[in-house]
Image (cartoon, rainbow, N blue to C red):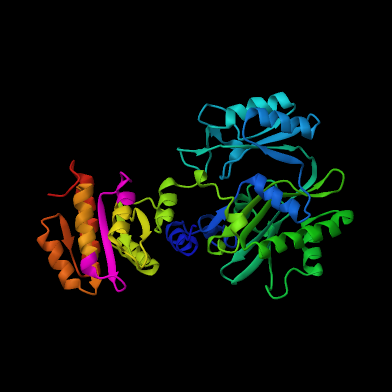
């Protein structure tokens, strides 16, 4: 199973742009990368299990299934939603030219037509990058009309080290845009994890949001049930946008986004069995299956390090010397030759990488064993990019001698600052020239 929770948080915190306080919502900057996300239709199923009202709907994996589901829902007013784990689906474009990953449909025939155009194609949104993400299924649901739309999220806030409920009367829109343009419209309620969400607290949030009087109690119950899911399922984020009061005065979650703590996979097996790795970076999935903690970044200096803290320090010192790390890669305590080879294959699969900085502390494993693995990997993969190796700890002298006698283009440097400087220097030389290795 995937053990990336803690290290995802570290790496994403390093890589994420720093937002001003007026733009930041509790937990938003880091939670995207540290938590398992599940598709909307699965989130809707989970809400139903806890007695929370959601529009009638089901998932389809073909045009024929979409048509059958639309017939079962009945009526002539439905919505089809591409099941892609990315924001901005409604404004996205598929690789076949179809615009909009969320569309209103008026018949089973339309459900089939749009499903056939969405399933099997990549949807490009503001969050996916140009490569887009594959749509394997669509969610067909009834279209409900809302009198009022609100925003509500239950998050784990690191500043207070506890849960918070973030709410706004301005729902159904980009909440980060609301936070930027009208921060006073965002309300934050801190929850004592030992007490939970009391009736008075939930009722106060519902009233402040602006639910009509006849919906206050139902809204209170919904807020408390959402917190129960958050607590019982080890969630890091439950985002409902919009949380609506319908035209017939029902409280309904129209859309849901869930995130779960990766560190809880051992006790949330049912949730983690719903992970869709087709929505994740293929290299990160491959790394996780090999027991490596790997996260792609935007730079060009590959990093191979053992230990999350040392990995962060390595990326920091590269930045301080004017370079940019291409990845976070923690091979853990068992930096075996096989792990080193897998790590190098992951790093060098990124064509932007112009140098590799290996920074290993030999404690559990010996530095000379790491050196053997490093030399053999460079030979096997026929690597042509500069490699700077800083091996410290048990048998470091033997490791240095092995590298120096190997005849390989590997540079053994003991001092961290000097090693980082050399990595940045080599990277710049390679980028300026036409060869993959500095003269």
* Residue 191 sits inside the magenta stretch: no
* Residue 354 sits inside the magenta stretch: yes
Q: Residue at the far right: name it.
A: 214
Whether 195 is drawn above or below 147: the answer is below
Identify the image quadrant of residue 359: bottom left
Is residue 324 or residue 60 the one in the foreground? 60
The percent position of residue 133, horizontal first and vertical second, equals 51, 39
Identify the image quadrant of residue 35: bottom right
Q: Is residue 232 visible?
A: yes
Q: Is residue 303 visible?
A: no
The percent position of residue 7, horizontal first and vertical second, equals 45, 63
Q: Residue at x 12, y 58 (%)?
A: 406
In the shown orientation, is residue 269 left or right of residue 193? left
Is residue 380 or residue 417 the one in the foreground? 380
Which range of residues does the magenta coloring cover? 345-369
The percent position of residue 292, horizontal first and vertical second, equals 39, 58
Q: How many marks?
A: 0
Identify the image quadrant of residue 358: bottom left
In the shown orientation, is residue 171 left or right of residue 326? right
In the shown orientation, is residue 428 left or right of residue 279? left
Whether 48 is drawn above or below 304: the answer is above
Whether 223 is drawn above or below 245: the answer is below
Whether 150 is drawn above or below 330: the answer is above
The percent position of residue 319, horizontal first and vertical second, equals 32, 60
Q: Residue at x 70, y 58 (%)?
A: 167
């Amino acid at each position: 199973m995937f053990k990336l929770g803690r290290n995802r948080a570290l790496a994403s915190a390093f890589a994420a742009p720093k937002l001003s306080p007026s733009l930041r919502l509790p937990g938003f900057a880091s939670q995207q990368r540290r938590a398992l996300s599940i598709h909307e239709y699965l989130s809707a199923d989970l809400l139903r299990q806890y007695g929370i009202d959601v529009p009638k709907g089901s998932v389809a994996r073909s045009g024929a299934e979409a048509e059958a589901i639309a017939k079962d829902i009945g009526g002539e007013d439905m919505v089809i939603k591409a099941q892609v784990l990315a924001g901005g689906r409604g404004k996205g474009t598929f690789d076949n030219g179809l615009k909009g990953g969320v569309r209103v449909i008026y018949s089973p025939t339309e459900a089939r037509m749009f499903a056939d155009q969405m399933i099997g194609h990549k949807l490009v949104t503001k969050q996916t990058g140009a490569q887009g993400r594959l749509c394997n299924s669509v969610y067909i649901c009834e279209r409900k009309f809302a009198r009022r739309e609100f925003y509500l999220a239950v998050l784990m806030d690191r500043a207070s080290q506890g849960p918070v409920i973030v709410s706004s009367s301005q729902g159904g829109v980009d909440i980060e845009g609301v936070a930027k343009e009208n921060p006073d419209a965002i309300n934050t309620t801190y929850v004592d994890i030992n007490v939970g969400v009391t009736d008075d607290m939930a009722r106060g949030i519902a009233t402040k949001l602006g639910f009509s009087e006849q919906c206050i109690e139902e809204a209170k119950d919904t807020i408390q049930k959402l917190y129960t899911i958050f607590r019982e399922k080890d969630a890091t984020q439950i985002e409902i946008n919009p949380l609506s009061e319908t035209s017939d005065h029902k409280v309904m979650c129209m859309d849901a986004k869930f995130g779960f703590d990766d560190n809880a996979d051992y006790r949330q097996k049912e949730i983690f069995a719903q992970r869709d790795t087709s929505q994740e970076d293929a290299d990160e999935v491959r790394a996780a299956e090999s027991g490596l903690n790997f996260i792609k970044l935007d730079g060009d200096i590959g990093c191979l390090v053992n230990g999350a803290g040392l990995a962060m320090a390595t990326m920091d010192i590269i930045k301080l010397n004017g370079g940019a790390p291409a990845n976070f890669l923690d091979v853990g305590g068992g930096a075996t030759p096989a792990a080193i080879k897998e790590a190098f294959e992951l790093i060098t699969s990124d064509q932007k990488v112009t140098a590799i900085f290996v920074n290993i502390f030999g404690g559990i494993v010996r530095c000379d064993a790491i050196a053997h693995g490093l030399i053999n990997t460079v030979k096997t993969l026929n690597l042509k990019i500069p490699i700077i190796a800083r091996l410290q700890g048990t048998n470091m002298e033997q490791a240095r001698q092995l590298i120096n006698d190997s005849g390989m283009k590997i540079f053994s440097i003991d001092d961290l600052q000097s090693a980082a400087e050399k990595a940045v220097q080599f990277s710049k030389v390679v980028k300026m020239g036409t060869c993959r290795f500095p003269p």
